[in-house]
Image (cartoon, rainbow, N blue to C red):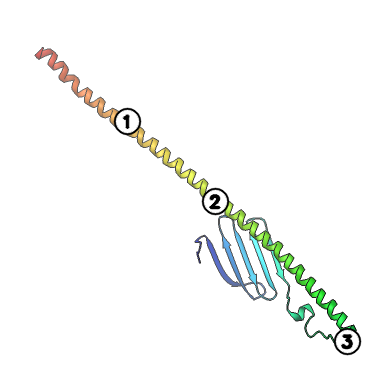
Amino acid sequence: MVIDPTIDLAIQPNSDARPSIALASSPETFALSVNPKPLKFQVTTGNEGFDVKRINDLDSQSLGVYKIDVVGEDKAGRAVTITQDAINKISRERSSLGAFENEFTRTMSRLDSIKLNTEQAESQIRDTDMAQEMINFTMSQLLTETSASMITQANMMPNAIWDLLFKG
């Protein structure tokens, strides 16, 4: 498992005094909270508020298929109806979870894009800063070499005059 240092993970009690797992990421805040029974996901992205996804109980008791009596034509027909209703309820929940997963995936993709764009911008800023420093260094080197050349020429002038006057 790769752990991103920009992600904070915290487990803390929520307002219902039940444990909550919260996951937060930067640069744009992204939080995921998971509360047990009923299972509830809360996703927060930046200043956009939050989405809460409650996963309904889908056990045999909550679906009404626990201890179905199929003895007799009436009861068998009712059992088929109950079973079909349970299948429909499960299908709706799966559809809802699929939509939530798609939204979650889009949010993660958007956050990845934000992270990539931020890294690229930071790289361009560093490149610009480096170019500016190279310009400053080159200018400093030119001034130093020009100054040294001027001093050398200035020091040679008295010698040239001396040679003309006394040796020539």
**x then y, percent, for residue 148:** 25, 29
**x then y, percent, for residue 119:** 51, 50
Q: Tell me if mark 2 has few (under 14), some (14-19) or many (20+) residues whose alpha carbon lies within 10 angstroms of its own.
A: few
Q: Earlier in the sequence, mark 2 or mark 3?
A: 3
- Quadrant into which the C terminus falls: top left
Q: Residue furthest left?
A: 167
- Report the residue marked by disc 2: 116
Q: Secondary structure at mark 3?
A: loop
Q: Is residue 93 left or right of residue 139?
A: right
- Report the residue marked by disc 3: 72
Q: CA distance from mark 2 to mark 3?
A: 64 Å
Q: Report the mark closest to the observer, 2 or 3.
A: 3
Q: Amino acid at mark 2?
A: Leu
Q: Tell me if mark 3 has few (under 14), some (14-19) or many (20+) residues whose alpha carbon lies within 10 angstroms of its own.
A: few
Q: Report the mark closest to the observer, 1 or 3.
A: 3
Image height of 25 relative to 114, above or below: below
Q: Earlier in the sequence, mark 1 or mark 3?
A: 3
- Report the residue marked by disc 1: 143
Q: Amino acid at mark 1?
A: Leu
Is there any visible trace of residue 45 in the rendered image?
no
Is there any visible trace of residue 102 in the rendered image?
yes
Count of numbered circles on the image: 3
Contact (Cβ within 8 Å) of mark 2 with mark 3: no
Residue beneath the point at 28% across and 28% down? 147
Q: Quadrant of residue 97?
A: bottom right
Q: Report the mark closest to the observer, 2 or 1.
A: 2
Q: Is residue 145 left or right of residue 134?
A: left
Residue beneath the point at 55% across and 57% down? 26
